[in-house]
Each structure stands twice: as C-alpha cells, then as structure tokens.
Image (spheres, rainbow, N blue to C red):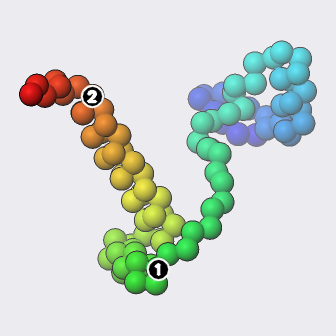
Amino acid sequence: MTKKRGKTVNPLSIEEIAEQAEKGLDISEHFTGQHSVKKFVSIDFPLELLQAIDNECRQVGVSRQAWIKLACDERLRQIQSVRIGSLSLPAKRA
C-alpha cells in the first residue's frame, strides 16, 4: 500500500487499471504526473565537442546525459523566447 494525499491507495497492476479505464471509471489517482514519455536517441558528437561537454560535466558535477538535456532545454527556451519577442515588436517602416 502507498500513501497518497492523505489516503491509502492499494497499487493495482496495469491490467487492473486498464480494466477500470475500459469500464469508464476514473483512473486518474493512479497517475502522479512524475513520469514522462522518453525516447532513446543516439547522437554522434565530434570528439573535441564531447571532451568539452565532459569537462563541463565534471565542473558542474552532473552526468553527460543530464548536461546535454539541460543544454538542449535551455537553448530551446532561448530560441522560443526570441521568437515570441520578435512577434511582439512593431514592424519597421521604410
């Protein structure tokens, strides 16, 4: 048994949860939102870039995988921020 939001919840197998869902029952209590879908990817890096990443990982104290995820996330947020900012700028007149 696990404790969730002050109540005790008996963990169910995925089959039991699926059966409840097929019956139209609310199964939301079985999902915490802590997990996300992941997909494995394989990327080739130039050796010098990989060495620079590894050096940064040692400095910061994180794994290579964690650093790459954080770097990608940071860069994507930066790009999205620039795009959103450029949409709100008034158009230049000639």
Q: In x, y percent, where is residue 82?
A: 27, 40
Residue 54 appears in view: no
Q: Looking at the rendering, which quadrant does residue 9 occupy? A: top right
Taking the image as shown, residue 68 lies to the left or right of residue 17, namely left
Three-letter code for the amino acid on which mark 1 is drawn:
Pro
Q: What residue sits 62% from the left and 67% below the top?
A: 42
Three-letter code for the amino acid on which mark 2 is drawn:
Leu
Q: Secondary structure at mark 2?
A: helix
Tag 1 residue:
46
The mark nearer the N terminus, 2 or 1, is: 1
Crowd around label 1: few <14 · some 14–19 · many ≥20 (10 Å): few
Q: CA separation, marks 2 and 1?
A: 35 Å
Crowd around label 2: few <14 · some 14–19 · many ≥20 (10 Å): few
Q: From the viewer's side, name the closer residue of 36 and 42.
A: 42
Q: What residue sits 86% from the left and 40% below the top?
A: 13
Q: From the viewer's side, name the closer residue of 68 and 5.
A: 68
Q: Looking at the rendering, which quadrant does residue 44 occupy? A: bottom right
Quadrant the C terminus occupies:
top left
Q: From the viewer's side, name the closer residue of 65 and 13.
A: 65
Residue 53 appears in view: yes
Q: In x, y percent, where is residue 57?
A: 39, 74
Q: What residue sits 66% from the left and 54% below the top?
A: 39
In this rendering, the answer to whether 26 lies above or below 29 is: above
Q: Secondary structure at mark 1?
A: loop
**Residue with the most extreme left position:** 94
Tag on residue 87?
2
In this rendering, the answer to whether 62 lies above or below 7 is: below
Quadrant the N terminus occupies:
top right
